[in-house]
Amino acid sequence: MLTGDDNNTKDDNNTKDDNNTKDDNNTKEDNNGENIIKKPRIKRVKKINNDIIVIPTCDNYNAFLSNKFTSLQLKQICKHYRLNVTGTKQVLTNVIYKHLYLSFHANIIQNFWRKYYTKRFARLHGPAQFKRNLCVNETDFFTMDDLKSIPYTHFFSFKDSDNMIYGFDIMSLYNLIEKQDDNNVLNPYTRNPLGRHILKDFKSLLFLSKLLNEDIPLIMNEPEENKNMDNLEHRVIALFHEIDMLGNYTNPLWFLELQRHQLIVYMRELYDIWTYRAQLSDQIKNEICQSGNLFQNIHIIDLPILNLRELQDTSLTLIERLIRNGINQNSRYLGSTYALCALTLVNSSAAQALPWLYESVVMPF
């Protein structure tokens, strides 16, 4: 005969057993003895046809449990997601559910960070990203393209120390920074050093562009690699910009205005400066032009038989050797000085702008 206390004890035991059973159902151990993710109680009411199987996705991971799959179908799903295909039906079900569950929540986190990086990528384009008319310059300093024609993802702008906003093609600014020391990168429009925060923002922009799979071309074809390019003016502007970056002041028109006979005289004067007038030692020649032979494959005696374009190409090749083949910055600067010295002898505008170079090489009468 049971007393009231016995009934209460029995009810308590039943309650504990029910709770333990419930906990066991929500937290199970896999074949490695590790707890698996709790799965909701879902009654499986639909048996999947053996001939038709739809691979479950992480977006409906809970619906996966409402379907009854065969062992073969579960293994096919595991192969699709590159999961372990060994084990019982319950083990395979746990593995698939865990993968779908974690993938669903991983996507939420990834979408959050992708949104954050996208917003930051947009801000790093600068104050003129959508209002190009805020820039004081209308064209890119290197490509000479109108700023309004530069695609959004290829554009970068910043406010300089003079509170003016300048815009650039990312490719042009990237190559400018690559050729200079980080502590000596100058704004090509003002010759003022670029602030560290500007360089930091620019590098962050490049990093995020790769992270977001934005295709931004950074490597340009050097004029030396494409001497037959149709745009001669582009080649000259690029070359004289490099000379400016070495610490000089130039104007591309000094070269573009030269006629055929002036180009011949220019190369003859440069040959005389390099060979005799500057009294350069072999060591200095090797430091400026690593082969030591500036006029390699160029014959001064053959210049009169060349046409205008051939003379221009040959002259530019010599200048390129002087400013690009040096062993260091000082050697390239010295090479650019000799290129400009010869230019002052054939162009009066260059001589007026650089009188100290003209006087250093002009022959006394």
Image (tube, rainbow, N blue to C red):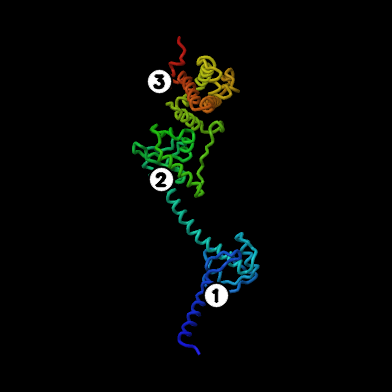
Which callout, 3 or 1, points to the residue nearer the camera? Answer: 1
**Measured from the top left, where is residue 273 in percent x and y?**
51, 17
Circle 2 crowding by C-alpha within 10 Å: few under 14, some 14–19, many from 20: many
CA gap between label 2 and label 1 equals 55 Å
Residue 104 visible within the image: yes
**Measured from the top left, where is residue 302 in percent x and y?**
59, 19
The residue drawn where x is 60% and y is 73% is 47
Image check: 290 left or right of 111? right
**Measured from the top left, where is residue 147 in percent x and y?**
42, 41
User: What's the amino acid at mark 3?
Assistant: Gln
Residue 311 visible within the image: no
The residue drawn where x is 51% and y is 42% is 217
Q: Regarding mark 1 in the picture, which secondary structure is present there?
A: loop
- Residue identified by numbered label 2: 129
Which one is nearer the viewer's eye here, 226 or 306? Answer: 226
- Residue identified by numbered label 3: 352
CA gap between label 3 and label 1 equals 93 Å
**Measured from the top left, where is residue 25 in percent x and y?**
54, 72
User: What's the amino acid at mark 2?
Assistant: Gln
